[in-house]
Amino acid sequence: MTGSLNLLFLPPFSIVARFFATACLFGVFGILLSVYMFLTGKLSLPAIIHTYTLGFAGMTMVGALFQMIPVVAGALIERPLLKATLVHLLLLFGTLLMVFGFAGVGTLLFGGVVTFAGFGLFLTFTLPPLLKLKSYTPTSRGMKFVLLNLGIGILMGILLLFGLGERLGLSQAYLLELHLSFMLIGWVTLLVISVAFQVVEMFFVTPPYPSLISRHLPPALTTLLFAKLLFPKALAPDIFIALLTSVFSLVTVRNLMNRRRKIRDPLVYLWYLAMVLLLVSSLLFPVRRQSWDLFILFLFFFGSFAQTVIMAMMYRIIPFLVWLHLTNKGISKAPTMHEVIGQRVIWLHYSLHIIAIASFLTSLAFGEIVLGTCLLLYLLSFLLLTANILRGIFIYVKLSRT
Amino acid sequence: MFITQYLTEEHRKCDRFYADAEKAVSEGKWEEAEKHFSTFKEKTLLHFRKEEEILFPEFEARTGITMGPTQVMRFEHQQVREMLERLEEALRNRNKEEFLSVGESLMVLIQQHNMKEEQILYPMSDQHLDREEVVERLSQLGEV
């Protein structure tokens, strides 16, 4: 009885588990790939970038949305396990084929089609329930724009891969600019913003976001992205985008400082760090086209922002779901969240993460001597994340069989 | 007044009561923690009573949906009640680690429960029920 009731809103644990575990493994894989490329001198930045944007961030966000959409939109995703399995496999193989393709193996186009199919399928399951909603919270409204932007972003990506833009009179540079903007700002940043509207206030007991921000920021950011469609070289949309995302990060920091839950929680500090990284990447966004160094710096700060939010998200979602699913299975005294992943190990990871970020910034000044240490620190960081998430999953598997 | 607005405000108030109890526990101020926790428990249970005695039956009678969201909400209320007992036990034993760990799970459970109510059940109730009358009857049970 309890199981069937919860099926209304609670998809099987294996869905989130498989997406998050795969994402962690992509995190480790990306570092190993970078080491291999540096050692052999065959560096491919798109291969490394897509390992993280698709393999790490994309996997996590799609997995989390399978969990969140039923709660946010109040709509059951029918046969979630089958749909999630399909999307997961398409994204997994699509990403691997694309990454190897970018590295020169010759699987790029096929990988692009498979990834496109994965995201396309995902959108057909998630966008309709959101569009059918009769009333919207800031989060559900924001997610509608997020999924729309994702659709446009992947479309630009596929046009780019197949060189189809030129037949339509669109240059590759134009498509690349739009692909990057829609994916990084319209999909990743706006998803974090939309989720934050709900989770920051509710989980940390903070004052609410001003309604000017929570109501208007998602459509405003999306409008600015559409302005870039018409005026790709104009600086003004970039400046306004940077302004809006900066305001969001500053308001979030202010809200967190005024939170009612005053306990020392590593997840609060991960959010603080993420907002500082978002602020820096926002300031770099309008100037990223001026030089290669600024572009790399923008990508690094943006990537670190996304990685930090993802860590905060995983460290809350996995322990909670392990506890909740075990409790629903009638296991008395199921391990609570801190027992699934201890606070100390999250603090340890928080410190390691900051040191890794600092080491990368130092390596920009001191070159290859520090770069080796930097890669080692990132490897340790992703291994620690993988170990913690897999530990949570194993606890669930072990106890659910007893 | 909208049902959504009235009951959402109760959620936020309960969150604040919990945050006060949690802070006192983390600082080792046990007597203060007991006082805040007792307020949190009393107000949370009052909020549940309002929903279970007035809102849910009204919703079920008006919409004919008896095995849908209201049943899930009742089930989750029961889960929260069990967690409240565990927290009370941790308080009695002055077990800070246990309180904070169980409290974290409770907090996330409550928040995902609240999200469903605020996003789905309350707006549906505003749509189908005489909202002024329902809010009036909810208020008669006391203030959270």
Image (cartoon, coloured by chain):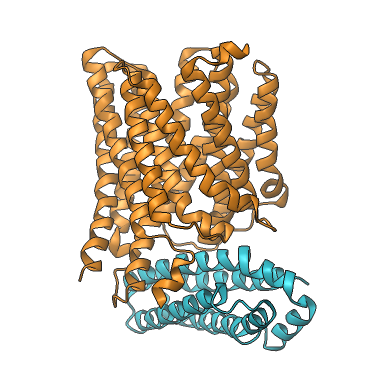
* Left or right: A209 as drawn, with respect to A10: right
Residue B58 on image: x %, y %: 67, 82
Residue A248 on image: x %, y %: 61, 42
Chain shown in cyan:
B
Query: Does residue B27 appear in the picture of this structure?
Result: no
- In this rendering, the answer to whether B75 lies above or below A52 is below
- Out of A158 and A279, give the one closest to the viewer: A158
Residue B32 on image: x %, y %: 48, 79
Query: What residue appears at the point 46 percent right and 64 percent down from the top-left corner?
Result: B108
Residue A214 on image: x %, y %: 67, 49
- In this rendering, the answer to whether A6 lies above or below A383 is below
- Out of B96 and A291, give the one closest to the viewer: A291
* Left or right: A21 as drawn, with respect to A253: left
Query: Does residue B85 appear in the picture of this structure?
Result: yes
- In this rendering, the answer to whether A136 lies above or below A279 is below
- Out of A180 and A254, give the one closest to the viewer: A180
User: Residue B57's image quarter?
Assistant: bottom right
Question: In this structure image, what is the colour of chain A?
Answer: orange
